[in-house]
Amino acid sequence: MRKFWTEKGIRQIDWLWAATMTGLFVLGLWHYGEVQAGAEVCGDTWLTGNYKMLMGAVLVLTGLLGWLFLGKPGGRQWKLEQIYPVAGLSMGVLYLLVFPPLSGPDEISHYISAYQLSNHILGQPSNSRDGHVLVRGQDWFLEDSHGEYVYGEEDGYWTMVGTKDESKPAVILGQVLTEETYRLIYESFHNGQKALRDGEAEHLAVSPYPPVVTTPAAYIPQALGISLARILNLNSVWLAYLGRIGNLLFFVAMTGLSIQKAPFGKEILAGGGLLPMTLHLSGTFSYDVWILAWMFYFTACCLDLAFAAERVKGRDVAVLATVMALAGPCKMVYSVFMGLCLLIPAKKFGSWKKWALSAGLVLGAWAVVMVLINRQVVSAYAAPETENYIGWAEETGYSLGMLLHQPRRTIQLFYNTLASQSQGYLMSMIGYCLGNLDPVLNVPYLLVLAFIGCLLCLAFRKPGEKLVLIGGRRLWIWLLCLSCMGALMLSMLIAWTPVSSSVISGVQGRYFLPFLPIFLMSLKNDTIVLTRCGQRGILYGMYGMNAYVVMRIFSTVSIRV
């Protein structure tokens, strides 16, 4: 080890840091020209000033993280669980600012769900008679940023009864991310939020967007941020940002705890937390953040109990049961990963009786919450002859009975989907289409390949590293991953795919992120060993690539007028 930290080693570290900083500076100047062009067309000259601040923040933060990730020979070497919170929070904030409120996937529905929970937290009326969520009158701005709603009153609440122009629907802030979105937010911060209707500060309004039917726990971080904004009487844009910041803080904290808990594979967990899609989601209202954070932590806990802890204690079982109860109801397909508990040797429980009791507690906690939260969904899926209708396609959908009675067709659907969509799943898991699945707001193809290469390098064994996920353990993990992927595809086949489709609709790459770390850990082998490039350097490279992505996205939006 001492031999590694020679002058040559110092030069390699300095070279990596210098190359990253130089590349960001040059590319930042290149995209500055695009921002200038956009500012000239739309007349919003402040865009260039904002981009300069973004570029400055990118360079300062990337320089700082180089010191933390790479360190200096003979100096203090920071632990990865200490570095990741700084890296995840700083880059997450940049993504959060470049992608404004409600620009994420299905974010309007998650925002409304968080708002509903905030109403309960603050003891305010939460729903109208038809079940729709009540918001402050001024907060209609987020879902109707141009003031297109025509409203009436019912039960003392404002209600949307139409739009001023039936051919011109209301504009949700950020759903289609353009330069105008940046302008609306800029004006809200600098000139105050312009009232679109008289008396909006005194009224409660009914949002036309329904909340997501899932466990309210998935929106606790977002709801706390919204509640703080309401207590401080901040405007709608501040409210949305504080809600998103709550989600980001939760994700970074839980991922940091997961890295600390994991007995090995820490770099892989950090790499999963530094993907563009992961960072982008962490700064939105999406409940995918809740699922990701808890699945990362569940994975770390199972690995710790299986390969590091001397024995399993009662509180360990309680933690596993609590995690499954909190995360399971959001997307029940991830309950497959309760199977990771089977990696823990039965002898660590003290007896087979204690092992069976522990397994029953974890499974029981998940089952009870699932029945309480999702019993209607489960009943609809389980009924073999239930007629299914896919609203977005205005067609009949597949039912479980139809799939069971036509096994050849079912297998063909799965085969067609994997054959034609696998590349898209991989690309979108990394972050090829960000925003509201907007192909314009993408990570360049070469960078996607680079991120994939980084993940694979993180999965390679280091010299002297002991292999533990081998043989039957490796096969079990692969079976769990395959089962979870199959369950995801089956759920979208029933819930989202019309019978006229030859492939399964609605499956997105980000759905595979919760089990990406454990899959990568299972790839470690004796054939490929990482000897030349340190894993900290790989993580720093991922941070630098994200830094470029946020500058590029800002410049792209600036010329999207």
Image: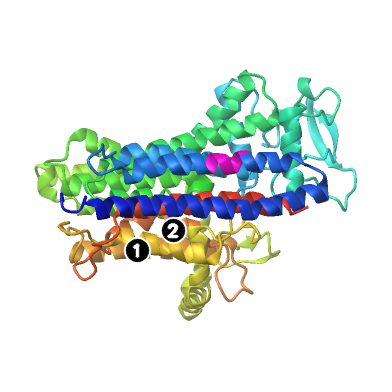
Q: Residues within 10 Å of mark 1 (few under 14, many from 20)?
A: some
The answer to which image quadrant residue 523 occupies is bottom left
Which disc, if any, is residue 456? 1
Q: Is residue 127 visible?
A: no
Residue at 37% across, 56% down: 515
Residue 269 placement, left or right of 210: left
Given residues 542 and 132, the one toward you in this image is: 542
Which disc, if any, is residue 512? 2
Q: Distance between the residues labelled 1 and 2?
A: 16 Å
Identify the element where label 1 is drawn. Answer: helix
Q: Give how far across and how far down residue 110 sits, in percent.
A: 59, 42
Residue 241 placement, left or right of 1: right
Q: Residues within 10 Å of mark 2 (few under 14, many from 20)?
A: many
Given residues 318 and 67, the one toward you in this image is: 67
Q: Does the magenta stretch include residue 392?
A: no
Given residues 16 and 525, the one toward you in this image is: 16
Residue at 85% across, 50% down: 168
Q: Can residue 124 be seen in this view?
A: yes
Say above or below: 227 vs 183.
above
Q: Give how far across and how far down residue 555 sits, in percent.
A: 66, 51
Identify the element where label 2 is drawn. Answer: helix
Q: Is the magenta stretch mostly helix, strand or loop?
A: helix
What segment is highlighted magenta in the picture? 53-58
Say above or below: 42 vs 466.
above
Specify the amino acid type for callout 2.
Phe
Residue at 64% across, 49% down: 554
Specify the amino acid type for callout 1.
Leu
Q: Is residue 55 magenta?
A: yes
User: Who comes first in sequence, dot 1 or dot 2?
Assistant: 1
Which disc, if any, is residue 552? none
Q: Give how far across and how far down residue 177 sits, in percent.
A: 70, 50
